[in-house]
Amino acid sequence: MGGEPGVAVFPADILGESSAGEGYVLNGEDCAEGDDIWLGGSPARSMTYRVPDQCDEDVQQWQVHTEG
């Protein structure tokens, strides 16, 4: 995102909750907070996605892709 703040938007089919109750599943792999992950992506189209209240709605959204 070029060093600017942004919001990563993950497709629902690649991100999920871990069955262990901690961390998350990304592309079928268990991950934990602090793990290094590699993601591809591109700026989101003109459509904007709902963001958490803690995020600035005017920040560029980045559509995450399944491959880096």
Image: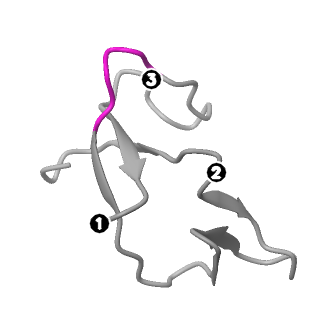
Does residue 44 appear to the left or right of 25 in the view shown? Answer: left
As drawn, which residue projects farthest toward the top? 46
Disc 1 residue type? Gly
Question: Do the residues under discs 2 and 3 have CB atoms within 8 angstroms?
Answer: no
Secondary structure beneath dot 2 equals loop
User: What is the magenta range?
Assistant: 43-48
As drawn, which residue projects farthest toward the left? 2
Residue shown at 32% from the left, 15% from the top: 46
Q: Determine which of the numbered discs, if any, sits on residue 57 in the image.
A: 3
Q: Determine which of the numbered discs, if any, sits on residue 2 in the image.
A: none
Quadrant in the picture for residue 54: top right
Disc 3 residue type? Glu
Residue shown at 86% from the left, 76% from the top: 19
Residue 36 percent across, percent down from the top left: 41, 83
Residue beneath disc 2? 13
Classed neighbour count for the residue bearing mark 2: other residues with Cα under 10 Å, few (<14), some (14–19), many (≥20) = few
Secondary structure beneath dot 1 equals loop
Residue 41 percent across, percent down from the top left: 30, 50
Q: Is residue 4 magenta?
A: no
Residue beneath disc 1? 68
Disc 2 residue type? Asp
Structural distance between the alpha carbons of marks 1 and 3: 25 Å
Secondary structure beneath dot 3 equals loop
Tell which of 10 and 58 is nearer to you.
10
Question: Relative to 67, does residue 9 appear above or below in the rendering?
Answer: above
Could you tell which of marks 2 and 1 lies nearer the N-terminus?
2
Residue 45 percent across, percent down from the top left: 31, 22
Quadrant in the picture for residue 27: bottom right
Residue 50 percent across, percent down from the top left: 58, 24
Could you tell which of marks 2 and 3 lies nearer the N-terminus?
2
Q: Indicate the quadrant containing the C terminus: top left, top right, bottom left or bottom right.
A: bottom left
